[in-house]
Image (cartoon, rainbow, N blue to C red):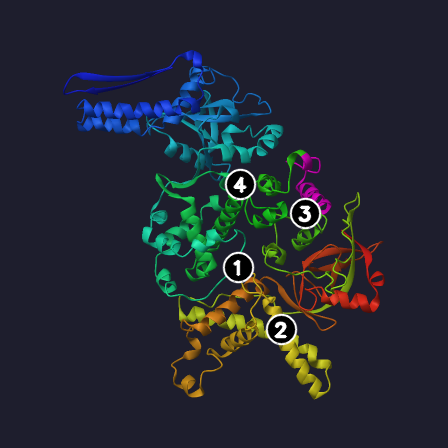
Amino acid sequence: MKLEVQIRNESMHTTHQLSLSQTEASNPTPDDDALAIFLFLISTTISLMLSGYVETGTMDVLIDYLAMDPLQIMALHWLKNTGRIQYNRETTRLYEDLREDEIRILVLEAGDPDSEISCRLVTCSHGDRLPYDAISYAWGNPANVMAINCNGMAVQIPVNLYNALFWLRKRTEDRLLWIDALCINQEDMEERGDQVQKMATIFSCARKTLVWLRPETKDTKGALYPPVRYDRLNKNVGWMFRAPPGPFGYNFAETEDKRDLLDMDWRPLMRLLEQPWFTRLWVIQEVARARRVTVLLGKTKISWDKLASTVTELHHRGLLDAVNFTEEAARGAEAVIEMQAARERTSHDLQQSLLRLLLATASAECSDIKDKVYAVLSLATDYNPNKDGVSFKPDYSITDGEAFTRVARWAVAKGDLDLLLSCATASDMEGLPSWAPDWSRIENHSPFLRFSDRINFDATRFTSNTELHRLSQPTYPKVEEDDTLILRGVQIDVISDLGPETRFQNTFMPRSLSSHRLARECNIKWIEGCLALANSVLRNTIHERTRWKATVELEKQFRITMTAGMTGEGDSAPQAFQIWVKDYIHWLQFGYPRWIQEETRQTSNNAAARPLPPGLYSDSIAAVESSISMWASKRRFAITSAGRMVLVPQHTSKGDVVMLVEGCRMPYVFRAQEGGMRYYRVIGEAFVADVMDGGFFESICAHEGREKLIRDFSVR
C-alpha cells in the first residue's frame, strides 16, 4: 500500500508531497492500518505547518483533507487491493447470492451536488471489520421513487432515501454505508428472512447509526438546536438514567419551571416528531442496538440521547397535552420513549421478553404486518433463534394470522400465558384465535402486568402462612391442533352493568381557562356517571344503619377502583390517597378545596374556573389525576352481579364472566360463545379490588373446596 498527499502552493510554485508506504505482502485489514493513517495525518499537518504552508487556500485544502475519515479511507483502499470492489467492472446482476455469514455494504461514491448519485455493493462478513455507518430512515410512499446508479445499473429507490444519499454524499471521498433497501435483495424472501435475523448484529457492529428524517425546512428549523430549551429540561432528568429503564406513567404535579416551559415555542419539535420515521417499527431495533445514534435534518444534527431525554421529560410531566402536540406528534413522542427504554435495557443487558416488546411497539407502523413480530425478535432476551426457531422464525410466506398464532403458541409453551391474555384484542384477523393477540391493533398499551416489576398483584396466590402456593402446581395449558386453548380456572363473577365510556382529559397546566373548565366538566361528568352506577349497588340495602355502613364501604371501594390502588407511576398508593381522591372529586365538582371557607369562596372572583395554584393541595390532586389517567381512563368501570366494582377492557359487555385462571396473576374477562361445544372468547384483564392479593381465592377455596371450584374450559 502507498498513500500520498500533495499540496501545491501556487505563490511559491512548489509542491509538498508526503507518503506512507507498506508492503503489499502484509495484507492489512482496516483496523491494522487505523493507527498508521492517524499518525500519518498528524505528521502531515505538522510538516506542512513547519514548512510555512499557511496561506488561506493551502490551509483550506489541508482542512478538507483532515476532515476525511481515515478509517473509511483505509477500508476502501483495502477493498480495492483485495478485489472486493472494482469501479470499472460491468455487471448484469445487481445482487450476487450471499453465504450464511455474509452481508452487503454500500459504497457511496463521492460527487458534486449536481452529479448523478452512484454507488457499489460490496459483499463482506463482520469478520472483515469494515468501518461502515448504518442508515435508519422511513421508506415513505413506495410509489414515490427516484433513480440512482448502483453497480452500473439504474435502480429505483424511495425519494426519502434518495434525499438521504444526496445529503450524506461527500465531495472528495467515498463512504461505507449499510442501507436495508439496497443491501438486502427485497425480492428474495429467503434472503430477506435470513438478513432480518442479522439486523441486530449489523447495527451493533456499525460505527454509528445515522437517523435520517428529511432535509431541514422552515417549520422544523430550530427543532434540533434550541440549547436553552433542551438544557432546561435535561437538567431535571438525571433520575431517568439512574432508575431502571422501562415503562412509567405520569406525574402531573406542578413545579416552578412548568409555566416557563409552557411559554416556549415547541412547534419545531412538534413538527419534528410528526415525521414518519418515529412511528416506523424497524427503527426501534436500529436505535436500541446502535453504539451511537445521531439524528439528522439535512446537515443539522443532534445526539439521540439529548432528544430522547427532552421528550421523555415532557411526557412524564404531562406537558405534551399542555403544549398542544398534535396526535401524530404525541405518537412520535411515545415512540421515542419506547425506543429509549429499549436502548437503555439493551445497553444494561436487562431482560426484555418478546411479549413485552410486542406490547411496547404495538403502535409502531410497518408495511408487512408480520414485521410486528420479526422486527423486535433480536431485542428479546427470551427468544433464542437456534432453539426457538423450531416454533417460529421470520417467514414471509405465511399469513399474518398464522404468524401471530405461532408466537402465541410459543408463549403458552414458555408459560407466558398471563401477559398473553392481558393483550387480548377484539380482532377479526382471519385464522387468529381470541387468545392470540393481534399485535397490529392492541386496545390498551398499558396493561397492569406491563408494570409487574412494581405491581404485586397475584390473584391466585394463597396468603396463609401454612400454604403459600399458586392455584395449583405450575402446569402449562394445552393447545389443541385446531388452536383451541384449554385452561383451568374458576368463575368468580359476572358483569351486570357498565359505566359510561371514558372521555378523560388532563386538567393541569391548560393553555387557557376555557380549556381547563371544559376538561373539568368532561372529567366530572364521567366520574359522576361511574359513581351513579356504583351507588346502584345500594338499592337492595333496606335498613338505614346497614345502608350507612354500606355507603362508607362503597365509597372506599370506588376510590380504590378508580385508581387501581396505585399512583400514576405504578407504585402502591400511599395511605393518604383515599382522602386525596375525595378531594379531587370535590374539586372537579366545585372548583375549590373542601377546606376553603365559605366567605373566601364568595369573595373569590370566578374561583371555580381557575386552576389551583402551586402547593401541597394541587400536588395531591395532580397525583390523583395522574393515577386515574393512567389506569381507569384506559378501561371501563363496571359492576358485577355480586356487587363488586371492577375495571374491565373497553369492549366488555353485560353477561361477560370474570374468572381466575391457573398460572395467572390477574383476573380475566371471558365471553361465552354459542356452539355445539361450549367455549369462551378472551376479552382481557380485569381489576377486582378484593381479589388482587389472593386472599379472596383462599377464602372461597377453604369454604367450598378447591377441587369443586376449579374446572377446565376451552378458549377459541
Q: Position of residue 268 (x, y in %)?
A: 37, 51
Residue with the mark numbered 2: 558
Near mark 2 (Cα within 10 A), the count class, few <14, some 14-19 or many ≥20, is many
Residue contact between numbered discs 3 and 2, judged by CB atoms under 8 Å:
no
Q: Nearer the viewer, mark 3 or mark 4?
A: 4
- Residue 483 in sight: yes
Q: Nearer the viewer, mark 3 or mark 1?
A: 1
Residue 51 belongs to magenta span: no
Task: Decide which of tag 4 and tag 1 comes sooner along the chain.
Answer: 1
What amino acid does circle 4 point to?
Gln
What amino acid does circle 1 point to?
Gly
- Label 4 sits on a secondary structure element that is helix
Q: Which residues are magenta?
A: 387-414
Residue with the mark numbered 4: 285
Residue drawn where x is 43% and y is 62% of the image: 322
Residue with the mark numbered 3: 429
Q: Position of residue 464 (x, y in %)?
A: 74, 65
Residue at mark 3 to residue at mark 1: CA–CA distance: 31 Å
What amino acid does circle 3 point to?
Met
Q: Taking 84 as reference, is 157 above or below it?
A: below
- Label 2 sits on a secondary structure element that is helix
Quarter assignment of residue 535? bottom right
Of the pair 602 and 200, the residue shown nearer to us: 200
Residue with the mark numbered 1: 249
Residue drawn where x is 40% and y is 79% of the image: 606
What amino acid does circle 2 point to?
Phe
